[in-house]
Amino acid sequence: MKAYAAVDLGASSGRVMVGRVGPDSLELAEAHRFPNRPVRTPEGLRWDILGLYAGVLDGLRAAGPAVDSVGIDSWAVDYGLLDADGALLGNPVHYRDARTEGVAEKVWATVPASELYASTGLQYAPFNTLYQLTAARDSAQLACAERLLLIPDLLSYWLTGEQGTELTNASTTQLVDPRTRDWSYDIASRLGIDLGLFAPLRQPGDPAGVLRAEVLEETGLSGPVPVTVVGSHDTASAVAAVPAVEERFAYICTGTWSLAGLELDAPVLSEASRAANFTNELGLDGTVRYLRNIMGLWLLQECVRAWGEPELGELLRGAARVPALRSVVDAGDAVFLAPGRMPERIADACRGSGQPVPESRAEITRCILDSLALAHRRAVNEAQVLADHPVDVVHIVGGGTRNALLCQLTADACGLPVVAGPTEAAALGNVLVQARAHGLVGDLAGMRGLLARTQPSTRYEPQGDTARWRAAEARLAAR
């Protein structure tokens, strides 16, 4: 068996997992977990990238001393800027920072939204890298920058001294053409974005260098240790770990965000797809992740934070006793994007749409879970129609698999069986791409077969009539 360290960074925490892979075995263990706490500075909301790098080093130390490879995945769109000496120019800006407010309209004045979608296939989100770069156009940092590295590539650079831009993550910048799987040179030129800032594109499975001697000394790992390019967008790694075997499936990657959609062979670039705000991000082996971003468990995480971190199990047990679909909100509404006052904002949204206002913690929690299940239903149903790609089952992977109520509500809302698991999907996808690069597993189907044989899952059958979900959907659409 070989041991692979998967650095998996989420929006609220980071972890270093160790996957041990053999001919027909796959085991995953946590070496180290650490918080990811953004910092609000006078300039705005920033990532504590040095704290994250320290967590990575601590995790590699805990994973050792014998590791056969390291891979890194994280959230998308954000980046660090380097000067001519390769030094970081300030802490990376957080995608929830307010600097991109109103920027999209400026971009669309040059490249209309319909043209932008036809060229890049990316949904509108105010924090896409393209909008961040437009917002930073006149900044001193960008003027001094010689290189832009997306977050996983930045950490890989610090570990190895080598630079590259991983393709699945690059596809979230809104600067990649999903048909050619290369940069959209026309869009960048029209918007005055210098693609020379980006390091050369590289693919999952490519070598990314070896750990520097200083890193080996600090972590105690026995060198040489290669770093392998994985699907460095955590959703790309998570979708690679969907244990679907000969199934027509939809997937929902759950965590701070819910990413709900389909795996396709080609992008869907129609005007109807743009109007429905579906995105075409690149996946492994020439696939396209056709999905919609939904606010996800961020809604509940922010409520829990506002309530002083009560026990989650008790909240969910209370929510299960609340009548279903009493009140729902649009879980994709940008009004919920920023941190702070989440319980009040959910109550305001219900009040504004003429629905009963949830008051207790159990009622607010149930409103969130019903709303997420409803958003999952809408995304899965619309994706099938827009892509002409029917499905028979929904796979849920990621942190939301621990939430049995959400999984059952999603099955009920979609009217389809839900298979929940694995929980650490991004780390498992990360590990398997490393193992494949070193000859231990085969193609994507082979990876998924190994997952299905070795990783536990739970199946939820739909209960009740979907009519009540259709009614809630209509109620929300009419507000």
Image (cartoon, rainbow, N blue to C red):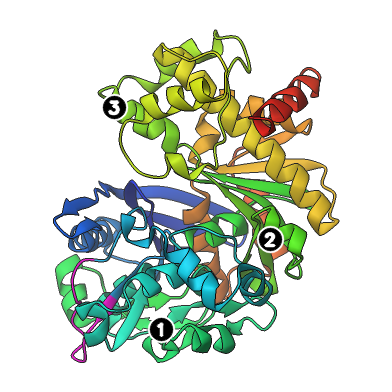
Provide the residue span drawn in magenta. Answer: 81-91
Residue 94 % position (x, y): 31, 58
Q: Which secondary structure, mark 3?
A: helix
First along the sequence among labels 3 and 1: 1
Pick the front one: 232 or 70: 232
**Residue 457 appears anywhere in the view:** yes
State the residue in front, 353 or 473. 353
| Camera sees residue 460 | no
Residue plotted at (49% across, 65% down): 105
> Label 2: few (<14), some or many (≥20) within 10 Å?
many
Amino acid, disc 3: Ala
Camera-side mark, 1 or 2: 2
Q: Helix, strand, or loop for circle 1?
A: loop
Contact, mark 3 vs mark 1 (Cβ under 8 Å): no
- Which is closer to the viewer, label 3 or label 1? 3
Disc number lying in front (3 or 2): 2
- Could you give the CA–CA distance between mark 3 and mark 1, rounded to whole angstroms? 39 Å
In the displayed structure, would residue 312 be above or below residue 431?
above
Residue under label 2, please give it: 274
The type of residue carrying mark 1 is Gly
Q: Position of residue 41 (x, y in %)?
A: 15, 55
Is 76 a magenta residue?
Answer: no
Mark found first going from the N terminus, 1 or 2: 1
Name the residue at 59% across, 61% down: 123
- The residue to which callout 1 is attached is 164
Q: Is residue 87 one of those drawn in magenta? A: yes
Considering the whole magenta stretch, tell me its main secondary structure: loop
Give the amino acid at mark 2: Arg
Residue drawn at x 75%, y 51% as measured from the top left: 383
Which quarter of the figure has residue 113?
Answer: bottom right
